[in-house]
Amino acid sequence: MAILAPSLSPPPAPSMTAAPKPFKNAPATVFPPNGEAMPTPDTESPIPRLALDVDSISAGLASALATSVVAHVLFLKNQVPFPIMQLSRLPNGKSAPRALKLRTELLTSFDTLSSHLDTTFTALSTAMALCRRNQNRADGTCRAQLAILVGPSIGAAKTKVIFVVDGLAARVWGERDDSDEDESGDSESESESDGEDASEPPESDSEEEVDNEESSESEAENSSSPPRPKPRIPFSPAPSTPPTSRGPHAPRETDNEQQLIRTATRQLSHAMATAESLSAELSSTQTHILLHAPRRFKHPAWVPRQTVGNAMDRAAASFAEQLSGDIRATKRKQKVEGVWVGCRTTSELLDGEDEEDEMIWWSWDGKIVGFSDW
């Protein structure tokens, strides 16, 4: 008969084949053509990254991602008690008058910023393309940088978040693609040739017109019955601007662009929400938006800021070192947070010898003030 005795040896070690804990924040998210996201085999990084499976990032996609980044920074930095989308759906009856006023002002400022960002990246893309052409370089991609500073002023910011779009398409606004120009040129040449054939009269038309006029005058004199009135054709004014031919694939491209914007925004929101490095319990203060753009950049909502150029350049350089995994960046006193979005191609900052090509920092002329009461 077996005798059971208490064991004095320590319990066995857990199996080494146990499943490892998943990373809290994937370093990158890659979008394959079918729209499904999958993590890339890279080391864990505190900086949220998003890699899109596209050749370049359009201005519309960049503006949508920038708006999403600003909204998440406001919530993660404790400038709003709820996310922006949820904040706009709160009932007004349960809020104090002062809290309701602050909430309304913040939502109004955020809506204004969103509308300005829609045209900001288009103007930035145009300015970058003109810089490339001024440097005798073909249109391609560029690197855009947007800074979100939380603090009472730009110089006294408590935290800085850099949003980098690596691969923004540099195109002059209003210019059509070569494929669209070829299609429209073929259709216009066909219509012109048809119009010329129809407008060329035969040689005997002038003689026939004279005979017809004489016969019509004699018939009018002999006929006693009044002529029949001509039917009235309703007047329809011609369009002021002719429609632009975008080719048969334009609706399809628009649908694909909207689908890409929705997918990329959703994945970026998830990456930022799970990034513990962006969360901070800050007191309610102001939020300032800055943009790195050439001097030739033109937009009524942005003001050049020459005095903060050196400080912002150091902040952008510090973020670039942290993004590349440089050990020296961890020893810097200035910690800069950020989000990186890229595509298949990598870009470089443009800074030519021409004064108009010089990259400077611009600040948004709006005002965003955080609050905690609701």
Image (cartoon, rainbow, N blue to C red):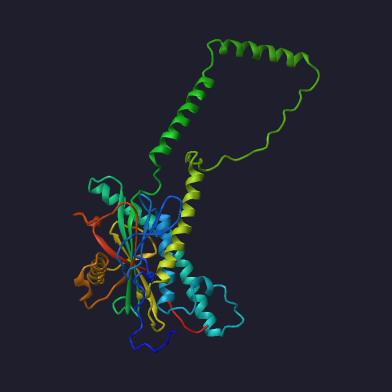
Q: As rendered, which of 13 and 242 lies closer to the eye?
A: 13
Q: As rendered, which of 266 and 255 lies closer to the eye?
A: 266
Q: Which residue is drawn at 28% across and 59% down?
A: 295
Q: As rendered, which of 216 and 200 lies closer to the eye?
A: 200
Instruction: Return the residue found at the far right.
Output: 225
Residue 17 picture location, percent across and down: 36, 69
Residue 32 picture location, percent across and down: 41, 52
Question: Based on the displayed image, in which of its 4 quarters is residue 343 positioned?
Answer: bottom left
Q: Which residue is drawn at 43% across and 50% down?
A: 33
Question: Based on the displayed image, in which of its 4 quarters is residue 28 positioned?
Answer: bottom left
Residue 338 picture location, percent across and down: 33, 69
Residue 109 picture location, percent across and down: 46, 71
As drawn, 235 above or below 201: below
Asked if residue 70 can be seen in this view, the reply is: yes
Q: Which residue is drawn at 32% across and 77% down?
A: 159
Q: Which residue is drawn at 36% across and 83% down?
A: 11
Asked if residue 366 can be seen in this view, the reply is: no
Horizontal arrangement in the rendering, residue 33 relative to residue 329 (left or right): right
Quarter of the image that includes the N terminus: bottom left
Horizontal arrangement in the rendering, residue 130 relative to residue 81 (left or right): left
Question: Based on the displayed image, in which of its 4 quarters is residue 77 positioned?
Answer: bottom left
As drawn, 127 above or below 303: above
